[in-house]
């Protein structure tokens, strides 16, 4: 069976991630390398409407490393997608000029592309459910990012409904959670904001049809690692694991109440998530409450495979 080697890059509000993979004729995907760096591209975008020069530079440094790996591993196609932070930025052309310079040196003509929230949702769904038993569907896949949250309903036949709402762990933290730890009033305000945005999404996606909730991206996988009492972040133990809602709420409430130093001391916690995991925890808690009420779902299933896998697969489909 022949295979083609491709590279997918997902540049979000908080992190930039790389997947180099071999995709076989039957559509199966085998990792060559999978990396993540927190660059906080969306630093301040919610308040200023612009990408900070230092955030673009942090992203450039990471992208140069990724471009070197793409060259060394012999990937023949690359697709880089940019999501919430770039969609919102007035000076996004500065960012795209940088990506043309870096990626174009490896594969002529390669550059980042802004995708809509709807396409972001569909790519996340494709990556998230590939290894799940179709009998557990319909699935509601939630991609909780730094600046936006995508909610997708679908099954083995594809996506039925999708919506992207502009709230995520970075955006909610910057908007509401200013103290360390946040005050009760700040947490209450954050819950109101998250509740309004999640309700906006769930009014458009009929989640009552769903049987299984699948969470993807760093907030969800970190919460699962903590819920399972892991000493270090272990993707093999996290992937496709389940977290009952009572345990999920316990972990989320603990993170919201913790100081930055207490969160930083947790073994599975990436340093780039320390200051925003509280915001992500509030969004996750609101989601759990709503999915329990609307669909009778009682646990979160976490997938390590997400939009990155969808991006890679899109290069051969």
Image (cartoon, rainbow, N blue to C red):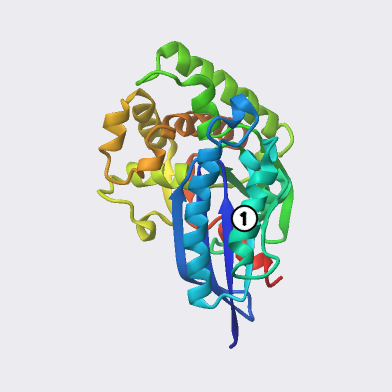
The N terminus is located in which quarter? bottom right
The image quarter containing residue 290 is: top right
In the rendered image, which quarter contains the C terminus?
A: bottom right
Q: Is mark 1 on a helix, strand or loop?
A: helix
Residue drawn at the location 57% of the way across and 18% of the way down: 192
Residue drawn 40% across and 44% down? 222
Q: Which of 189 and 61 is in front in this view?
A: 61
Residue 119: give x, y in percent of width and height: 71, 51
Residue 6 on image: x %, y %: 59, 72
Task: Determine the image quadrant of residue 33.
Answer: bottom left
Answer yes or no: is residue 42 visible: yes
* Vertical order, 156 against 142 (above or below): below
Quarter where residue 267 is shown: top left
Q: Measured from the top left, where is residue 271 in percent x and y?
A: 35, 42
Vertical placement of residue 216 versus 1, above or below = above
Quick one: which residue is furthest to the bottom in this view? 1
* Placement of 166 over or under 81, stated as above or below: above
Is 238 on the left or on the right of 284, as rendered?
left
Q: Which residue lies furthest to the top in this view?
A: 185
Q: How many marks can you see?
A: 1
Q: Mark 1 points at which residue?
A: 99
User: Left or right: 310 with respect to 286?
Assistant: right
Other residues around mark 1 within 10 Å, as few (<14) / some (14–19) / many (≥20)? many
Q: Nearer the viewer, residue 251 or 263?
A: 263
Q: Can the viewer see residue 303 in this picture?
A: no
Residue toward you, 170 or 71: 71
| Residue 136 percent location from the top left of the image | 57, 55
């Amino acid at each position: 069976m022949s295979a083609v080697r491709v590279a997918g890059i997902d540049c979000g509000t908080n992190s930039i991630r790389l997947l180099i993979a071999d995709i076989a004729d039957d559509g199966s995907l085998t990792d060559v390398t999978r990396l993540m760096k927190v660059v906080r591209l969306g630093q301040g975008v919610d308040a200023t409407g612009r990408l900070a020069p230092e955030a673009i530079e942090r992203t450039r440094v990471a992208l140069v490393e990724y471009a070197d790996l793409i060259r060394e591993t012999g990937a023949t196609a690359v697709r880089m997608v940019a999501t919430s932070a770039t969609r919102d930025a007035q000076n996004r052309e500065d960012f795209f000029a940088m990506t043309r310079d870096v990626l174009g040196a490896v594969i002529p003509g390669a550059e980042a592309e802004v995708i809509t929230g709807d396409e972001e949702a569909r790519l996340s769904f494709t990556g998230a459910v590939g290894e799940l038993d179709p009998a557990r569907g319909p699935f509601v896949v939630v991609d909780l990012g730094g600046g936006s949250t995508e909610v997708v309903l679908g099954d083995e036949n594809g996506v039925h409904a999708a919506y992207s709402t502009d709230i995520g762990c970075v955006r909610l933290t910057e908007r509401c959670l200013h103290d360390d730890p946040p005050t009760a009033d700040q947490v209450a305000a954050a819950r109101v904001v998250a509740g309004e945005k999640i309700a906006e999404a769930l009014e458009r996606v009929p989640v009552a049809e769903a049987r299984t909730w699948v969470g993807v991206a760093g907030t969800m996988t970190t919460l699962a690692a903590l819920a399972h009492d892991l000493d270090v972040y272990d993707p093999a133990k996290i992937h496709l694991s389940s977290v009952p809602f009572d345990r999920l709420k316990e972990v989320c409430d603990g993170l919201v109440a913790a100081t930055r130093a207490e969160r930083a001391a947790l073994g599975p916690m990436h340093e780039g998530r320390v200051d925003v995991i509280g915001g992500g925890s509030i969004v996750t808690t609101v989601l759990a409450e709503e999915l329990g009420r609307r669909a009778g779902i009682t646990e979160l299933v976490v997938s390590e495979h997400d939009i990155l896998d969808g991006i890679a697969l899109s290069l051969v489909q």
